[in-house]
Amino acid sequence: MIRKHFETLWIVGLFVLVAFAAGAQIARAEPRVTITYAHCCPPDHTYGVYAHQLADAVEKNSNGEIKIEVLDGGVMGTEQAIAQKVQLGTVQMGGITSNNVAQLAPSLNVLVLPYMNSGPEDLTGEGGLLRAGPYRDEMNKRVLEESGSLRIIGGFNNAFRSIFTKEECVDEIGDLQGLKIRAPKNPVMTAMWESWGVSTYPIAWGETYGAIATGVVDAFDSPTDVVLNMGFHEHIKYITEATYLPQAAVVIINNDFMNSLSEEDQQILLQSAEETDVSHAQYVAENGERVRNALTGDFGVTFCELKDPEVWAEKAQAIWPDLYSLVGGGEDWVETTLTYKDTGKLE
C-alpha cells in the first residue's frame, strides 16, 4: 500500500515536471511580433518606467506573442531624432515629450502653452487631455495629418517642470535676471521665457549635465525627479516647483507599421497603452513625494516657493495670441482645447 502510494506521487511529480518544462519552452518561444520602442532616459526614470510598464502589459495581454523591445537611455539619439525615426519607421514606437514631437506635428504645441493646465489631473486624470477619449482622438487625427505617419496611442506626464539653480532660490520673477538658463529648443517655450525677460540657452538634453557641471549654464527646468535620478543633485541645490508647464509626453507609433498589424494585435497595443496610462499616473503621484524626501533628506536640496505666481501667469498668458501661429490649428484648436477642459466636449 505504501509502495503504491509512492508510485502515485512519483507519477504526479513527473507529470508536474513535464508540464513545467513545457510551459518553460512556451515562455522561451520567440514572439511572433517584436516592436522597438525608444525613449530618452534610464529605465528607472519616469519615461523608462512607462516604457517597461507598457512592455509588460503588452506581453501579458498578448500571452507573450508580442514583445516590445525597449531601447533605454537615448541610444537612438535625442528626442527629436527619435520622433523622426518613428516618423520614418526605422523605430516603430517612442515615448517622447510633446514639445519635441511638435516639430513634426505643431498641434501638440497646444500642450506647451504656459498655464494651459494647472495640475497632472488635467492631463492624465479621468477625462484628461492625454487619456484615451474624444480629445485625444481629435489630437491624434491632427498629428497624423501634420506628420504624415505618426499616430498617438498613449500619453503620460512627469509632473510639472521645476526651476533648478546652483547658487540661490528663485522665489520671484526678478530672480531670473542674470541667470544662464538652459531650456528646450521649442519656439513656444522660448517665447514663454522671453515673456519673463529671459533669453535661454537651447542646449540639447544630453549635454545639459555637462553644461551645469562646467558652468556653461547655472539653471534649467525639468521635472524634479531628474535631479535625483540623473545625478544633478551634485550641482543643483535649489528647486522652485511651479505650475507653468507640464512635462507632457505622447506615445507615438508609425502609422504604416500599426496598420500592418492585425486588428487583434492593434487592439492589444491600444488596450495595453490605456492600462499603462492609468498605472503610470499613479506611479508619478507616488514618486513625487519620494523624490522630494530624498533630495531634502539625503542631499540637502532646498525647495523654494514662488512669492508672486500670479505675475508669472499673467505675463505668460498675455503672449498666447502671439503663439497661435506656432500651434497647429491656431486659435481655433486652442479654443477647442479650453472648451473640452471645461465641458468634456469638443464643441
Image (cartoon, helix red, strand yellow):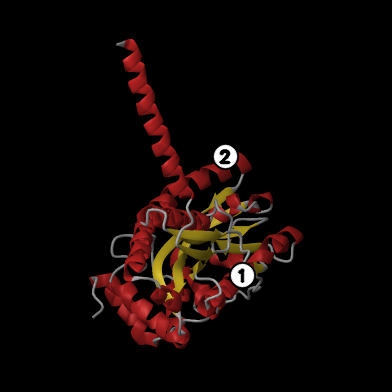
Closest to the observer, 80 or 307: 80
**Residue at point 50% right, 75% down?**
101
3D distance between C-alphas at marks 1 and 2:
32 Å
Q: Which residue is mark 1?
A: 78
Mark 1, residues whose alpha carbon is within 10 Å: few (<14), some, or many (≥20)? some
Give how far across and how far down residue 339 sits, in percent: 28, 76
Closest to the observer, 86 or 326: 86
Asked whether, in this view, residue 266 is left or right of residue 327, the answer is left
Q: Which mark is residue 297?
A: 2
Is residue 74 depicted above or below 17 in this figure? below
Instruction: Say which quarter of the image contains residue 253.
Output: bottom left
Asked whether, in this view, residue 97 is left or right of residue 64, the answer is right
Closest to the observer, 344 or 152: 152
Query: Callout 2, which amino acid?
Result: Gly
Q: Earlier in the sequence, mark 1 or mark 2?
A: 1
Give how far across and how far down residue 34 sits, in percent: 49, 63
**Callout 2 secondary element:** helix
